[in-house]
Amino acid sequence: MLTACRREPAPPSAEFEQASRQFTALYSQKLDEAYLDPQMGTIEAQLQRVPQDSVDAPASRDLLQRIQQNRARMQDAATARQKAVASAREIPPGAPSTTLTPLPPPPPAAEDAGPADAGVVNGPQTGTPASELVAGFRGCFKRGLPINVEGRGIREAWELNDSTSCRLEYPSHTGMVLLTEEGKVLTLLPKSSVRTVTQTQDAGTQPPAGNDAGR
Protein backbone atom coordinates (compact mmCIF):
# COMPACT_ATOMS: atom_id res chain seq x y z
CA MET A 1 0.00 0.00 0.00
CA LEU A 2 1.34 3.41 -1.02
CA THR A 3 0.96 6.36 1.28
CA ALA A 4 1.38 10.03 0.42
CA CYS A 5 2.85 12.63 2.68
CA ARG A 6 0.91 15.86 2.84
CA ARG A 7 3.06 18.92 3.33
CA GLU A 8 1.71 21.27 5.91
CA PRO A 9 1.72 24.98 4.96
CA ALA A 10 4.11 27.29 6.70
CA PRO A 11 2.71 29.00 9.80
CA PRO A 12 1.28 32.55 9.65
CA SER A 13 3.83 35.25 8.98
CA ALA A 14 4.73 37.67 11.76
CA GLU A 15 5.88 40.15 9.10
CA PHE A 16 2.46 40.14 7.44
CA GLU A 17 0.63 40.49 10.75
CA GLN A 18 2.73 43.52 11.69
CA ALA A 19 2.53 45.10 8.22
CA SER A 20 -1.23 44.60 8.04
CA ARG A 21 -1.73 46.15 11.46
CA GLN A 22 0.42 49.19 10.59
CA PHE A 23 -1.34 49.64 7.24
CA THR A 24 -4.77 49.60 8.86
CA ALA A 25 -3.74 52.18 11.47
CA LEU A 26 -2.10 54.49 8.91
CA TYR A 27 -4.97 54.32 6.44
CA SER A 28 -7.62 54.93 9.11
CA GLN A 29 -5.73 58.09 10.07
CA LYS A 30 -4.94 59.55 6.62
CA LEU A 31 -7.22 57.69 4.18
CA ASP A 32 -5.88 57.85 0.59
CA GLU A 33 -3.15 60.31 1.62
CA ALA A 34 -1.58 57.37 3.48
CA TYR A 35 -0.31 55.98 0.17
CA LEU A 36 2.04 58.97 -0.12
CA ASP A 37 3.23 58.74 3.49
CA PRO A 38 6.88 57.67 3.98
CA GLN A 39 5.75 55.06 6.52
CA MET A 40 4.19 53.11 3.67
CA GLY A 41 7.69 52.20 2.47
CA THR A 42 8.37 50.39 5.75
CA ILE A 43 5.11 48.47 5.37
CA GLU A 44 6.07 47.42 1.83
CA ALA A 45 9.45 46.17 3.01
CA GLN A 46 7.75 43.99 5.64
CA LEU A 47 5.34 42.56 3.07
CA GLN A 48 8.22 41.66 0.78
CA ARG A 49 9.80 39.59 3.59
CA VAL A 50 6.76 37.31 3.95
CA PRO A 51 7.85 33.74 3.02
CA GLN A 52 6.41 32.49 -0.26
CA ASP A 53 5.15 29.27 1.37
CA SER A 54 3.35 31.11 4.19
CA VAL A 55 -0.42 30.95 4.41
CA ASP A 56 -0.27 34.76 4.40
CA ALA A 57 1.69 34.98 1.13
CA PRO A 58 -1.36 35.56 -1.17
CA ALA A 59 -2.78 38.25 1.13
CA SER A 60 0.64 39.86 1.37
CA ARG A 61 0.95 40.07 -2.43
CA ASP A 62 -2.55 41.54 -2.73
CA LEU A 63 -1.83 44.24 -0.14
CA LEU A 64 1.50 45.08 -1.73
CA GLN A 65 -0.15 45.45 -5.15
CA ARG A 66 -2.90 47.63 -3.64
CA ILE A 67 -0.32 49.97 -2.09
CA GLN A 68 1.69 50.30 -5.31
CA GLN A 69 -1.35 50.92 -7.53
CA ASN A 70 -2.90 53.51 -5.24
CA ARG A 71 0.40 55.31 -4.72
CA ALA A 72 0.70 55.73 -8.49
CA ARG A 73 -2.89 56.99 -8.64
CA MET A 74 -2.33 59.54 -5.89
CA GLN A 75 0.94 60.74 -7.45
CA ASP A 76 -0.77 61.25 -10.82
CA ALA A 77 -3.58 63.22 -9.15
CA ALA A 78 -1.08 65.42 -7.29
CA THR A 79 0.81 66.12 -10.52
CA ALA A 80 -2.44 67.04 -12.31
CA ARG A 81 -3.36 69.48 -9.52
CA GLN A 82 0.06 71.13 -9.65
CA LYS A 83 -0.18 71.57 -13.44
CA ALA A 84 -3.68 73.00 -13.14
CA VAL A 85 -2.61 75.54 -10.53
CA ALA A 86 0.47 76.51 -12.58
CA SER A 87 -1.55 76.97 -15.78
CA ALA A 88 -4.09 79.11 -13.91
CA ARG A 89 -1.36 81.64 -13.12
CA GLU A 90 -0.36 82.05 -16.77
CA ILE A 91 -2.38 84.67 -18.64
CA PRO A 92 -1.43 84.93 -22.35
CA PRO A 93 -0.85 88.48 -23.69
CA GLY A 94 -3.91 90.01 -25.33
CA ALA A 95 -6.28 87.46 -23.83
CA PRO A 96 -9.69 88.69 -22.68
CA SER A 97 -9.96 89.22 -18.96
CA THR A 98 -12.55 90.50 -16.56
CA THR A 99 -12.52 93.37 -14.10
CA LEU A 100 -14.16 93.63 -10.74
CA THR A 101 -14.45 96.64 -8.47
CA PRO A 102 -12.96 96.32 -4.97
CA LEU A 103 -14.66 93.68 -2.90
CA PRO A 104 -16.98 95.11 -0.24
CA PRO A 105 -16.07 94.41 3.38
CA PRO A 106 -18.06 91.67 5.08
CA PRO A 107 -21.16 92.95 6.88
CA PRO A 108 -20.83 93.32 10.65
CA ALA A 109 -22.39 90.62 12.75
CA ALA A 110 -25.87 91.62 13.80
CA GLU A 111 -26.67 91.72 17.50
CA ASP A 112 -29.05 89.09 18.77
CA ALA A 113 -28.90 87.38 15.40
CA GLY A 114 -30.11 84.14 16.93
CA PRO A 115 -28.90 80.64 16.05
CA ALA A 116 -27.38 80.06 12.63
CA ASP A 117 -29.44 78.38 9.95
CA ALA A 118 -29.12 74.63 10.34
CA GLY A 119 -29.32 74.08 6.59
CA VAL A 120 -26.19 73.03 4.77
CA VAL A 121 -25.30 74.72 1.46
CA ASN A 122 -24.04 72.19 -1.03
CA GLY A 123 -20.86 72.89 -2.99
CA PRO A 124 -17.74 75.03 -2.50
CA GLN A 125 -17.96 78.06 -0.24
CA THR A 126 -15.64 80.79 1.02
CA GLY A 127 -12.55 79.09 2.44
CA THR A 128 -12.87 75.90 0.39
CA PRO A 129 -9.37 74.76 -0.80
CA ALA A 130 -8.89 75.67 -4.47
CA SER A 131 -7.39 72.23 -5.12
CA GLU A 132 -10.81 70.69 -4.52
CA LEU A 133 -12.21 72.62 -7.48
CA VAL A 134 -9.86 70.73 -9.83
CA ALA A 135 -11.06 67.19 -9.23
CA GLY A 136 -13.69 67.44 -6.49
CA PHE A 137 -17.39 68.26 -6.49
CA ARG A 138 -18.09 65.64 -9.20
CA GLY A 139 -16.06 67.65 -11.71
CA CYS A 140 -18.87 70.22 -11.90
CA PHE A 141 -16.67 73.33 -11.73
CA LYS A 142 -14.51 74.69 -14.55
CA ARG A 143 -11.93 77.46 -14.71
CA GLY A 144 -13.19 80.73 -16.19
CA LEU A 145 -11.43 83.87 -17.36
CA PRO A 146 -9.03 85.43 -14.83
CA ILE A 147 -10.54 88.40 -13.00
CA ASN A 148 -8.67 91.61 -12.22
CA VAL A 149 -9.95 92.70 -8.81
CA GLU A 150 -9.22 96.36 -8.21
CA GLY A 151 -6.83 96.69 -5.30
CA ARG A 152 -5.99 92.96 -5.29
CA GLY A 153 -4.81 92.14 -8.81
CA ILE A 154 -5.46 89.15 -11.07
CA ARG A 155 -7.34 86.33 -9.40
CA GLU A 156 -8.32 82.90 -10.70
CA ALA A 157 -12.05 82.41 -11.31
CA TRP A 158 -14.21 79.29 -11.46
CA GLU A 159 -17.82 78.70 -12.46
CA LEU A 160 -20.35 75.89 -12.63
CA ASN A 161 -20.32 73.62 -15.68
CA ASP A 162 -23.37 74.11 -17.91
CA SER A 163 -24.81 70.62 -17.51
CA THR A 164 -28.15 69.55 -16.15
CA SER A 165 -26.67 67.21 -13.56
CA CYS A 166 -24.35 69.91 -12.19
CA ARG A 167 -27.10 72.52 -12.04
CA LEU A 168 -29.29 70.08 -10.12
CA GLU A 169 -26.43 69.12 -7.79
CA TYR A 170 -25.34 72.71 -7.04
CA PRO A 171 -28.33 74.99 -7.77
CA SER A 172 -27.05 77.82 -5.55
CA HIS A 173 -23.92 78.15 -7.74
CA THR A 174 -25.79 78.74 -11.01
CA GLY A 175 -24.84 82.15 -12.41
CA MET A 176 -22.10 82.60 -9.81
CA VAL A 177 -18.33 83.17 -10.06
CA LEU A 178 -15.91 81.77 -7.48
CA LEU A 179 -12.76 83.86 -6.92
CA THR A 180 -9.72 82.15 -5.40
CA GLU A 181 -6.82 83.68 -3.51
CA GLU A 182 -3.91 82.07 -1.65
CA GLY A 183 -5.14 78.58 -2.43
CA LYS A 184 -8.70 79.09 -1.15
CA VAL A 185 -12.05 80.35 -2.40
CA LEU A 186 -12.05 84.07 -1.61
CA THR A 187 -15.70 84.84 -2.35
CA LEU A 188 -18.71 83.96 -4.54
CA LEU A 189 -20.17 86.66 -6.78
CA PRO A 190 -22.98 86.85 -9.35
CA LYS A 191 -21.71 86.95 -12.93
CA SER A 192 -23.68 90.16 -13.47
CA SER A 193 -21.23 92.00 -11.21
CA VAL A 194 -18.27 91.21 -13.50
CA ARG A 195 -17.43 93.47 -16.48
CA THR A 196 -15.55 91.98 -19.45
CA VAL A 197 -12.81 94.02 -21.16
CA THR A 198 -10.21 93.19 -23.81
CA GLN A 199 -6.60 94.27 -23.42
CA THR A 200 -5.21 95.90 -26.58
CA GLN A 201 -1.60 95.81 -27.74
CA ASP A 202 -0.97 99.33 -26.46
CA ALA A 203 -1.85 98.12 -22.92
CA GLY A 204 -5.18 99.94 -23.05
CA THR A 205 -8.55 98.34 -22.55
CA GLN A 206 -11.51 98.13 -24.86
CA PRO A 207 -14.88 98.05 -23.03
CA PRO A 208 -17.73 95.98 -24.40
CA ALA A 209 -20.09 97.62 -26.89
CA GLY A 210 -23.11 99.42 -25.49
CA ASN A 211 -23.80 100.62 -21.97
CA ASP A 212 -24.54 97.19 -20.49
CA ALA A 213 -21.82 96.50 -17.90
CA GLY A 214 -22.79 92.88 -17.37
CA ARG A 215 -21.27 89.92 -19.11
Image (cartoon, rainbow, N blue to C red):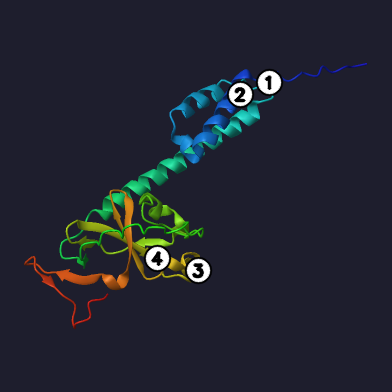
Q: Earlier in the sequence, mark 1 or mark 4?
A: 1
Residue in the picture at 46% in, 65% down: 170
Q: Amino acid at mark 2?
A: Phe
Tell me if 141 is positioned left or right of 87 in this view. right
Cα distance between the residues tagged 1 and 4: 53 Å
Q: Earlier in the sequence, mark 4 or mark 3?
A: 4
Position in image of residue 96 (x %, y %): 20, 68
Residue in the picture at 68% in, 20% down: 12
Vertical side of 119 occupied by 14: above or below? above
Vertical side of 188 occupied by 40: above or below? above
Q: Amino acid at mark 1?
A: Pro
- The 10 Å Cα crowd at callout 1, few under 14, some 14 to 19, many 20 or more, is some
Q: Secondary structure at mark 4?
A: strand
Q: Amino acid at mark 3?
A: Leu
Are the two marked residues, 1 and 4, in contact with CB atoms closer than 8 angstroms?
A: no
Tell me if 206 is positioned left or right of 13 in this view. left
Quadrant in which residue 197 is drawn: bottom left
Q: Amino acid at mark 4?
A: Leu
Marking on residue 16: 2
On the image, numbered disc 3 is attached to which residue? 168
On the image, numbered disc 4 is attached to which residue? 160
Marking on residue 12: 1
- The 10 Å Cα crowd at callout 2, few under 14, some 14 to 19, many 20 or more, is many
Q: Secondary structure at mark 3?
A: helix
Mark 3 vs mark 1, foreground winner is 3
